[in-house]
Amino acid sequence: MTIAQITDLHVTTEKDPLNQRRNEERLRQVMQAIHGLRPRPVAIIASGDLVDRGEREEYVELKRLMAESEIPIFYAMGNHDSREGFLAEFSGPGAETDENGFVQYTVDFGEMRMVVCDTLDGPNDGEYDEARAAWLARTLDEAPDRPTAVVLHHPPIPSGIRWMDPDPNSPWLGRLEQVLTGRKQVKVLMCGHIHRAFNGVFAGHVVSAAPATSIQLTLDLTEVDMHVPDGREILVEEPPGYALLMSEGGNLTTHMCLAGDYAPAVTYNFPFRKLA
Ligand SMILES: [Fe+2]
Ligand SMILES: [Fe+2]
């Protein structure tokens, strides 16, 4: 069984024609690739930055684009989102809120469980306050033995692309670490936000950050002065991507995928032999 993860869609309207055209085109490419996968994923998780400016009209546009999907879609909030705008257009499965109004919920897929968290705060850095952390602790304790994927827009570890990374001393990271440490059913933290695929470890769990459907960030790991523009390349025309989570025998495995029409290199016309 598989679940596709798309992230950082940044869907927008004709107010921003360049981003509107590019981001819609790239989202369509990714959705087409996902619909062509065999076996077909049972669900798609869109892990935040669903739209670009958090405006209601952008969520109307998102809804229009996603209505074409034959696969159910679940949503998480990113820093470009607005809960108000999102919840004005989306409700029910894939858009549920906790008792405090955060977009946080769980979904069961066969033996595995997905826990969607809401790390939305301000313009860039994430947030996970006491109320949200308490919800997560309680939610994870409801099913301590089921392989669980936790969805967070903001990766809780640095990517090395410094202008995007969280302040390592942010209190929300400590709260999250406290909740996740030792809860062994958590097999993977599925993230987005960096617009680039990378992996790492947080609180003893694998962090798997997926590439964006919209534009990718340039891999530049050098120091940057946030106040002195130095002309560096920030965004790059790499193909749009997505992640594919496979649940099998209690394991959760993540593949990073590029969307595109690639020709086969070799086909299976002879029996496989074990290579010694
Ligand atoms: Fe983003
Ligand atoms: Fe983001």
Image (spheres, rainbow, N blue to C red):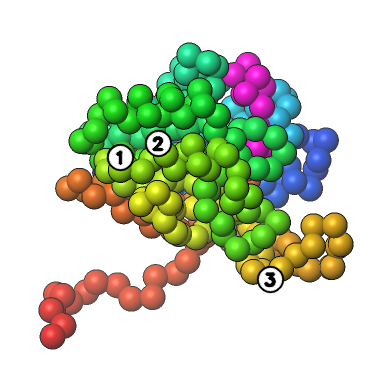
- Which tag, 1 or 3, sits closer to the chain's start? 1
5, 203: nearer the viewer: 203
The amino acid on which the numbered mark 3 sits, given as a three-letter code, is Thr
- Residue 274, image x, y percentages: 13, 79
Q: Which of pointers 2 and 3 indicates the residue nearer the eye?
A: 2
Q: Are marks 2 and 3 in contact (CB under 8 Å)?
A: no
Q: Could you classify mark 3 by the number of other residues whose Cα lies within 10 Å: few (under 14), some (14-19), or many (20 or more)?
A: few
Ligand 2 closer than 8 Å to label 1 CB: no
- Residue 41, image x, y percentages: 35, 42
Secondary structure found at label 2? helix
* Residue annotated with mark 2: 179
- Residue 11, quarter of picture: top right
Q: Is residue 43 magenta?
A: no
In whole angstroms, how far apart are the C-alphas of marks 1 and 3? Answer: 35 Å
Give me the disc on residue 162.
none
- Residue 165, image x, y percentages: 63, 53
- Quarter of the image where the N terminus is located: top left
In whole angstroms, how far apart are the C-alphas of marks 2 and 1? Answer: 8 Å
* Residue annotated with mark 1: 183
Q: Residue at left 30%, top 43%?
A: 182
Q: Tell me which segment is drawn in magenta.
A: 78-88
Q: Residue at left 83%, top 35%?
A: 15
Left or right for 2, reference 135: left
In whole angstroms, how far apart are the C-alphas of marks 2 and 3? Answer: 32 Å
Q: Is residue 79 magenta?
A: yes
Q: Are marks 2 and 1 in contact (CB under 8 Å)?
A: yes
- Residue 51, quarter of picture: top right
The amino acid on which the numbered mark 2 sits, given as a three-letter code, is Val
